[in-house]
Image (cartoon, rainbow, N blue to C red):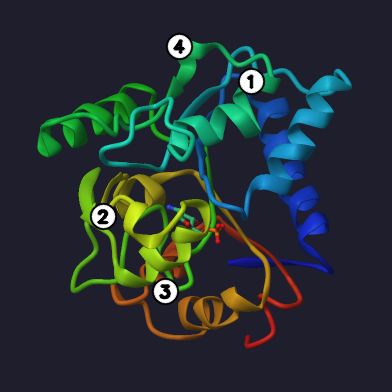
Amino acid sequence: MRIIRATNPTEAGRHTATIIASQVTLKPDSVLGLATGSSPIETYKYLVEWYKQGNLDFSQVYTVNLDEYIGLPADHEQSYARFMYNHLFDHINIRPDHVYIPNGLAPENAAEGARYDGIIKDLGGVDLQLLGIGTNGHIGFNEPGEAFITGTHCVDLSEATILANSRFFESADMVPKQAYSVGVQTIMQAKRVVMVATGKNKASAIRDAFCGPVTPKVPASILQLHPDFVLVADEEALSLM
Ligand code: GLP
């Protein structure tokens, strides 16, 4: 595990974007595993800026997103699909048929999980997985539990996650109670994993994930076992390490 220390969220975003830009430059048909939430927003801003300057080309890139709320159509303003188009896909030259996100309206949980895992397998797995971290240590929507779940699955969101994500909705009642999330196998099989974490509210999750035991009670802790894991974090997020 390597740690890249940033002085603030903007710098963390620039470091993270640099890693992704190197990946795309070295392997133009890379499969990028992408994340939503506030953590990667700065990263996406840099990628868009460098694309607009002519320094990046996404025409051969494939993307597979980590997760999606169940019950929200892709065009809902709080769907993760909408997030990705707003922050990245609408502003770069990625092909729409190279973009994969779980279908929040899929009625059969097991079938959607199998379909999505099949897509990732057919693409040859993920080259670079971008992650944020939840305040309870979740990655994607792999919530704390008794066991790590390997494949794409339906998750009952924890109270902590619903509360944390209610800032994007009118009230906590409006936050979907379930989501599809890729499992830890997809994340751990990615050739490289980069996590971006900023702010004081992530400090205890970062400490528990990387200074404690590997346990499904802190899902991000499994990344201690990944052979090429990079944490890009600001001083506040690292303050309890
Ligand atoms: C959501 C997403 C995660 C993300 C987490 C943290 O629950 N499913 O992928 O890492 O929130 O979000 P934020 O970056 O806004 O703190």
* Cβ at disc 4 under 8 Å from ligand 1: no
Hey, what amino acid is under mark 2? Lys
Secondary structure type for disc 3: loop
- What x and y, as percent, mark residue 162? 37, 63
* Relative height, residue 121 to residue 66 (above, below): above
* Residue bearing the label numbered 4: 97
* Residue bearing the label numbered 2: 177
Secondary structure type for disc 2: loop
- What x and y, as percent, mark residue 230? 62, 59
Q: Is residue 61 left or right of residue 50?
A: left
3D distance between C-alphas at marks 1 and 2? 28 Å
3D distance between C-alphas at marks 4 and 1? 13 Å
Q: Earlier in the sequence, mark 1 or mark 3?
A: 1
* Residue bearing the label numbered 3: 136
- Among all residues in the image, which is located at the extreme right? 53
* Residue bearing the label numbered 1: 90
Hey, what amino acid is under mark 1? Asp
Q: Is residue 216 left or right of residue 132?
A: left
Secondary structure type for disc 4: helix
Hey, what amino acid is under mark 3? Asn
Secondary structure type for disc 1: helix
Q: Quadrant of the C terminus?
A: bottom right
Q: Earlier in the sequence, mark 2 or mark 3?
A: 3
- What x and y, as percent, mark residue 131? 52, 52
- The quarter of the displayed image where residue 69 is located: top left
